[in-house]
Every structure is written in structure tokens, then in C-alpha cells.
Image (spheres, rainbow, N blue to C red):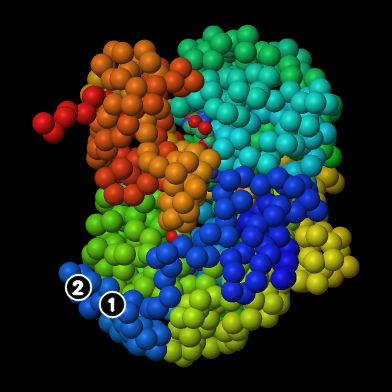
Amino acid sequence: MNATPTHCPYCALQCGMTLSGTASGGLGVAPRDDVPANRGGLCQKGWTAAELLTVPDRLTTPLMRHGRDEPLRPCGWDEALDRVAAEAARLRALHGPDSVAVFGGGGLTNEKAYQLGKFARVALGTSQIDYNGRFCMSSAAAASGRAFGLDRGLPGPVTDLAASGAVLLAGANPAETMPPFMRHLAEMREGGGALIVVDPRRTATARQADLHLQPVPGTDAALACGLLHLALAEGLADDAYIAARTSGFEAVRTAANAYWPDRVERITGVPVPAMREAVRLLARAPRAHVLTGRGAEQHARGTDIVTAFINLALVLGLPGREGSGYGCITGQGNGQGGREHGQKADQLPGYRRIDDPEAREHVARVWGIDPADLPGPGRSAYELLSALGTGAGPKALLLFGSNPVVSAPRAAHVQERLAALDLLVVADFVPSETARRADVVLPAAQWAEESGTMTNLEGRVLRRRRAARPPAGARTDLEIIAALAERLKAPGEWSTDPEEVFAELRRASAGGRADYSGIDYARIEAEGGVFWPCPSPDHPGTPRPFLDRFATPDGRARFVPVEHGGPAEDVDAEHPVYLTTGRVLAQYQSGAQTRRVAALAEAAPGPFAELHPDLAARLGIEDGAEVRLESRRGAVTVRARLTDAIRDDTVFVPFHWPGDERVNLLTNPALDPVSRMPEFKVCAVRLEAAVSPF
Ligand SMILES: Nc1nc2c(c(=O)[nH]1)N[C@H]1C(S)=C(S)[C@@H](COP(=O)(O)OP(=O)(O)OC[C@H]3O[C@@H](n4cnc5c(=O)[nH]c(N)nc54)[C@H](O)[C@@H]3O)O[C@H]1N2
Ligand SMILES: Nc1nc2c(c(=O)[nH]1)N[C@H]1C(S)=C(S)[C@@H](COP(=O)(O)OP(=O)(O)OC[C@H]3O[C@@H](n4cnc5c(=O)[nH]c(N)nc54)[C@H](O)[C@@H]3O)O[C@H]1N2
Ligand code: SF4
Ligand SMILES: [Mo]
């Protein structure tokens, strides 16, 4: 019997868990109570996580085919890797280095994310790399960067929330997406604090709130500007803070004039008294938080929406105060670290910009190459996927840690683009919907079978430990990358040891915004995690980054005036209902992992459309009946679930299921101009009772 303390394979809360068992038997999961994020709690996904290691269709041998109509057939590792390297080299010689692209994931450890970014730039020489984090919190990252000069998830340890006097959650449903997170909010409420939830649906989270604002999807910017207007009108602004710690307030004050309460009520559907109450609760609390989730961020104007919430937080004097602030609740297991170490099209390790000459110089030196040989910025995730196989686009794609056939917007189009490639290579541990369409499938080790580090929603770097051997036939992503780099005769070191890769990552990140250079495995273990930035071994780490100054050149937080613009695709006579999408507790993302765990598949067996009984009555749709949803991009038929918890102009469908039930057949890939994030959270649809085939 051995017991290995580690962290959950799924979301950004990275709950602590202990895996115990014997080599022959299965592993058992128990929650750890020494990890502040979950303190003895786990959600159903965490409790059942060990089952992932033994799913019946686990990939244990490379697979290959030579024509898309052929079935995938088992092959040897050398054969598979030789083919990938030879084909990549051939395409590069023929069409240039940008003809081979890489797509990564926010679930990869820091070590893998770093190595994948380096592999793309050094071994392939391509600028064409991006990752699914672009679909996740990139608008919050862009808005935080603009306002604070740095983007780091929560403003402090998650336990700060319990001592808060008010928390406003805009577009987040942690009761389903991070259940143990709710403990911190419950503790806050026990201490007299108020929870305010902004969501078009009365979610499980909203039901635990003191105040629920239920706006029309896509109107959060108007709402946040309206709250700011009220704060100014009622004399609740923190003038001393604004004078001492911010810049640009005048322009925002002027812009706020246009958001008088009645107008905002007309745009958002939120009653004026509820808005007033929200502002008072936030302003009166000695400590308060404004937090955004994907509901506020996944919009074609997501950066501006988040900026509107940040402006509100700044007017109330929250950011940079101990125990207060603005934060984004990150999503994927390594949603934080995944965006800091270079798998983003415009970034190098340490959150450096790839177009910054000094950054290029530093990173090129660590990589042992000439800075002139480093490619420049590439395409963002959706732009990359939709360029695949086109005249000017990449002809091969290497994909690690994402399942875009299910999770990308306008999924049928993305699927077509993938089919147009000369070569699709997928590394995964299960035959995901995307892996099934690949030319070469590389069976990867997972989570409890390898070690590495993850950076959770607090910005705390954690140790993931190995508790089991990978099945014979599987290799770790680091081994796969190193084997390909060797075949491509890439310069530099390509270690397969996570701790060695982390040591290199430390050097590459040194001096950057996300400086990890003072962090090592022993320290993480001894201190229960280290908060970045941590620029030297004797630096204590940075749990609360902006207490003294913001990371802007003048040390002040920047107000940026923004306007409400509404969704890229509004409702009209033909498509009269808003569609929004999101998650349910028992399924994770594209479902590639959780649909394979029996208890989770049983708890959430398939998609449904949540709609209001009044809307259903108008359309003649009954509870449990099949309903057809059609947008300008496609149609799906799912079961109707009637509930008065949703607005009667909106329908909600979760995105975890594949095939004809993919809600992403409908979603709008309109992109935010700054973050390049797609508008998953609102498009226009027509609904009708599905016609019986008989
Ligand atoms: N069970 C489960 N947990 C997960 C995940 C999962 O797939 N399943 N994924 C993880 C990841 S990667 C992420 S990013 C997080 C996401 O975590 P959340 O952000 O909490 O999840 P979502 O369900 O995408 O969206 C949250 C809410 O936004 C609301 N919403 C929709 N449109 C709007 C709008 O216009 N304005 C506002 N204010 N709200 C709106 C939806 O009704 C929904 O309740 O969850 C993480 N945890
Ligand atoms: N309509 C709609 N669509 C959405 C969203 C939404 O709210 N609405 N949310 C978006 C968001 S926030 C996100 S984060 C994306 C996520 O969507 P995806 O990127 O599809 O995320 P996953 O389903 O987690 O896919 C991860 C895949 O990689 C594999 N994998 C996991 N870990 C590893 C690893 O370490 N190595 C390798 N090689 N493989 C690994 C898993 O088995 C799985 O097949 O979906 C986006 N899509
Ligand atoms: S909340 Fe997230 S990290 Fe915690 S057990 Fe559930 S899926 Fe795992
Ligand atoms: Mo996400």
C-alpha cells in the first residue's frame, strides 16, 4: 500500500487528493484537508477521478492510417514518430515552416506547455501555435493586462474570499463548475458577507446568493457601466484611492454618464432597485471582490465587458487592497500556467511578448538559438483552426490536450478544416472525437502516471505526483516531444524528466512577468505551493500582487473607458431566441474524459435545452420532448428541460457531448478584437418542437 498526495486531474481549483492502492489493484481517491482550496472537499468528478486510469478504451499503442477512408491500425512507436517527423520535414521543405502547426491545452502541466511552445518555435520553426485557453479566459487576461499590467487569476489566496464582505460573481456558476469553492463563499455569508450573482439563469450558485441579477445574455457591459454610474451618483466612489492609485478616471466618469439606471434596466432587464442594492452591498463592505467567469468573458466584446467590471472594482477602491480585488476564476487544471509559458501564439515563456526584442533575446539564449531564428506571433486558436488546409494555412497539425471537434465554435467548419489537412497528429490517452479523425494517434500517459507542476486559480504553483505506472505502450508527452525533436534534429536540450524541464522553464521565465525562477520542486513540497511571481529562491512568492503598486509603468491601475455593444449576432424575426452555453457538474469540457466514467455518464447522460415554460408554451414544446434549435451555422435536436430558472428569451445548452448533439454546431465564432476569444455565450436561434420521423 502506498499513498501519494497529489491534485485532481480536472479543473483550476486543483483540489488536493491522496491516491492510494497497490500496483495491481485500482487506486482509491481521498480528499486532502491540508490544501486550502478544497480543505477536505471534492466534487463528484474528483471522487471518481481514478477511474480515468483504467477506462476500457484507453489508448496503449500508436495508431496510424494512410488514407482517411482507411481504419486506424496499431503500429510501432518508431514507425509513428518517423512518419510524423518525415512528413513535418517534407512539408517544411516544400511550403515553409508555418505549414506545420501545433495546438495545445490548458490542462497540460507547466513543463509540457513550456516544452510544446519551445518545440513549435525551435524544432518546427513555426509561428503557428495556439491553445484552447484562447477559448477560456483570454478576455479576462487581456482586460487585466490592460488595467493592471499583469493577469493573474484571483487577486489573492482563495481563503481571502471567506473574510470578504461582499463578492460579486459575474457569469460564473461554481456550484457546478468548482463545488468546493462554494465553501469559501458560504463561510463569507456566515460571517455576514453578501453574495451577488449575475447570470441569465438562476443557477445552483444564484440560489445560494443574497442577490441575483438576471440580465439578457451579452449585456454585462451595460450592467457594469450602470453599476459604476450608480456608485458615482450615490457618492460611493473611493475618491482617495482613485487619486492615489489609478489613472484615466475622467474619461470613464464621462462615459458612465450615458448609463443612467432606467436605460440600463431597458438594455439588461435588471430592475433598478436590484442594481442599487448590488452597488450598496459592494461599497459598504470593508473588503469586497468582483470576480468574472466565462459568462462575462466568452463574448465578441469580452475584453470590454471584463474591463467594465474592472472599472467598477476600481471606482470602489478594491484592486490592490489586502483581502479585496478583481479576479478571474480560471477554468482548466492549469489554466493559469498554461498561458504563461509559451503555447500562446503571441507569447514566450514568463508571459513575455514574442514581438519584444529583449524577450526574444533572453529566451533564444536559454534555448541556444539565434533570436533571429525565433518565429513571430502566429494565429489565434479559432483563426488557426479555420485556416487549416487552406491555400495559405498550415497543412499539418500536432495536437496535445484538446478536443476541438467538440469544443471549438462553429464545430462543423472546424471539423471540415481538420479533414482538409495532409497530416493530423493527436496525442491523447483516450480516442477522443478529434483523435478518431487523426492520421497518427500517439497514446499518452496521464495525470497520475507522471509528475509535473500545475498553477491553480490562485496563481499557486503545485506539485502533481506520480502514483502509478503508465500502461505498457503509452509514453509521456515530454517523451513524445523529445523523440520528435530528436528526429527533427532540433538544437538544444530536450529532457524527458519533468524536474529538469522545470529547471529550464525557471531560467526562461526569469525576469519575465510570470517569473518562476525562485520556485523549485522541493520548495513547492515544503511550502504547500508557491505563488508566482517568485523571482529568486529567497523570495517568499507573491500571494497578493498589487498591494504596493500595479504592474503598469507608472504603478497605477488604468481605467479604460468602454461602451456596451451587445452581442455580435442579435435576435431577429428569423432567430428570435438567445442561445447560451456552458457546463453541468458531472461532465468536463468536451466530455472526452468524463463520458468514460460510469457514474458521471449516468449522472449526466446527454445534452438538453433549458427553457422557460412560457417560451415552451408559445412554441408548443413539452418538458422532456425533443426540441430542434437552429442557428445560422447549424442545427441540433435535444430534449427540452422546462424551468422557470431561465429568462424567457434565452435557452441554455451544455456543450459536453459529441456528434449531432454538439451545441457548438450552432455557436458563433465572432472574435473579440483584443483577446481573439470567440462568442460562445450568445448567438441567435430559432426553436421548434422536433418533427417526429413517423
Ligand atoms: N463540471 C465542470 N466543471 C468545470 C468545467 C467543466 O467542463 N465541467 N470546466 C472548467 C473550465 S475549463 C472552465 S473555463 C470553468 C467555467 O466555469 P463557469 O464560468 O462557472 O462555467 P460556465 O457554465 O461556462 O458559465 C457560467 C455561467 O455563465 C452564464 N452566462 C451565460 N451567458 C452569460 C452572460 O451573457 N452574462 C453572464 N453574466 N452570465 C452568462 C451561464 O448561464 C453559466 O451559468 O469551469 C471549470 N470547471
Ligand atoms: N459552446 C461552448 N464551447 C466551449 C465552452 C463553452 O463554454 N461553451 N468553453 C470553452 C472552454 S472554457 C474550454 S477550456 C474548452 C475546452 O475544450 P477542450 O480543449 O476540448 O478540452 P477537453 O475536453 O478538456 O480536451 C482535452 C483533451 O486532451 C486530453 N488530455 C487531457 N490531458 C492531457 C495531457 O496531459 N496530455 C495529452 N496529450 N492529452 C491530454 C483529454 O483526454 C481530452 O481528449 O472548450 C471551450 N468550448
Ligand atoms: S472542483 Fe475541480 S479540482 Fe475539485 S474535485 Fe471537482 S473537478 Fe476536481
Ligand atoms: Mo475553460
Q: Say what amino acid the circle numbered 1 marks.
A: Arg
Say whether residue 415 is left or right of residue 214.
left
| Residue 679 quadrant | top left
- The answer to whether 689 is drawn above or below residue 636 in the figure is above
* Residue at horizontal 31 percent and vertical 39 percent from the top: 666
Instruction: Kindly indicate whether the residue at mark 1 contacts the one at mark 2 (C-beta within 8 angstroms).
Output: yes
Residue 384 locus on image (x, y percent):
37, 59
Residue 617 locus on image (x, y percent):
31, 13
Q: Say what amino acid the circle numbered 2 marks.
A: Glu
| Residue 360 quadrant | bottom right
**Toward the viewer: 37 or 275?**
37
- The answer to whether 505 is drawn above or below residue 163 in the figure is below
Is residue 375 something that shows in the picture? no
**Toward the viewer: 558 or 620?**
620
Real-space Cα distance between discs 2 and 1? 9 Å
Q: Secondary structure at mark 1?
A: strand
* Residue at horizontal 83 percent and vertical 45 percent from the top: 547
Residue 224 locus on image (x, y percent):
59, 25
Report crowding for label 1: few under 14, some 14 to 19, many 20 or more residues within 10 A (C-alpha): some
* Residue at horizontal 40 percent and vertical 85 percent from the top: 77
- Which residue matches tag 2? 70
Report crowding for label 2: few under 14, some 14 to 19, many 20 or more residues within 10 A (C-alpha): few
Name the disc covering residue 73, or none.
1
Is residue 685 something that shows in the picture? yes
Q: Quadrant of the C terminus?
A: top left
* Residue at horizontal 78 percent and vertical 65 percent from the top: 524
- The answer to whether 447 is drawn above or below residue 314 in the figure is below
